[in-house]
Amino acid sequence: MIPTVKLNNGVEMPQLGFGVFKVPDAETTAAVTTALEAGYRSIDTAAAYQNEAGVGTALASSGLAREELFITTKLWNADQGYEETLAAFERSRGLLGLDYLDLYLIHWPAPELGKYAASWRALEKLAADGVVRAIGVSNFQPAHLEQLASGSSVVPAVNQVELHPYLQQDAVRAYGNEHGIATEAWSPLAKGGSLLTETAVTELAAKYDKTAAQVVLRWHLQHGNIVIPKSVTPARVRENFAVFDFELTGADLEALNGLERDERTGPNPDTFNVV
């Protein structure tokens, strides 16, 4: 049974999901099908990934009841703005083949565009209209969240950020804890693979007879992060799901906490404004 995180509007979100970042649309259906067969019920995509149609095909052929699934997609920077956001949501919903989405996120604050507050008002309307169960943001720093709060009484349910032992996002997580915003980790294993060869990680993998990736995912879960590992390799998809039969000790967690480098492998949200 996958543990869930209760979001600030009462919606229950699986703590472990499956991401499809940069998976080509032609390969996405097979990857998502494998994930659903392995037991994942939360799927995370985005308009920018250009694979929402592939996700939708997998969902339609899965035989799973809609209420068993938790589907997230994201608004791309070029589509920010009030009316533009409403239109982009409809495109995504159509590609996914769904009547409603479980979570819709603003993908990046893109601060130079100056449109994320208007986009947020559109997300509020979508939630009020009942076509999305929860709304949130991605890659928002505390300053961006404060700006949203100054013009809205609706608090984001989720903030999805780059988060792994090299970049633990203490300030973002603390802000989320204080304001009831769940923190979700993208790139939870860090890009490039060096994290998985760290001695602190490999020693724990040997201790528990688990893979290095499983150890890091367990670290996330025990810190309360929502996590969405990505793989197109069926064996790894299944391995990343098998993280509920062991538990790290406090000392284990501290060993992994000690890997903090404040090191991003993706863009900086304060300067990323690509459309």
Image (cartoon, rainbow, N blue to C red):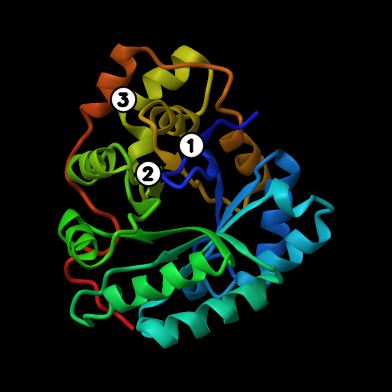
Left or right of 61, for residue 239: left
Looking at the rendered structure, the secondary structure element under dot 1 is: strand
For the C terminus, the image quarter is bottom left
Task: Name which residue lies at 66% across and 40% down.
Answer: 235
Q: Which residue is mark 1?
A: 5
Q: Nearer the viewer, residue 157 or 41?
A: 157
Q: CA distance from mark 2 to mark 1?
A: 8 Å
- Amino acid carrying label 3: it is Thr
Location of residue 119 (image quadrant): bottom left
Mark 2 nearby-residue class (10 Å; few <14, some 14–19, many ≥20): many
Count of residue discs = 3
Query: At which x and y percent is residue 246?
Result: 53, 16
Looking at the rendered structure, the secondary structure element under dot 3 is: helix
Q: Which residue is mark 3?
A: 199
Q: Which residue is mark 2?
A: 182
Residue 15 visible in the picture: yes
- Amino acid carrying label 1: it is Val
Query: At which x and y percent is residue 193?
Result: 39, 45
Left or right of 94, for residue 13: left
- Amino acid carrying label 2: it is Ala
Q: CA distance from mark 1 to mark 3?
A: 31 Å
- Chain-order first, disc 1 or disc 3: 1
Q: Is residue 226 above or below residue 61?
A: above
Q: Are marks 2 and 1 in contact (CB under 8 Å)?
A: yes
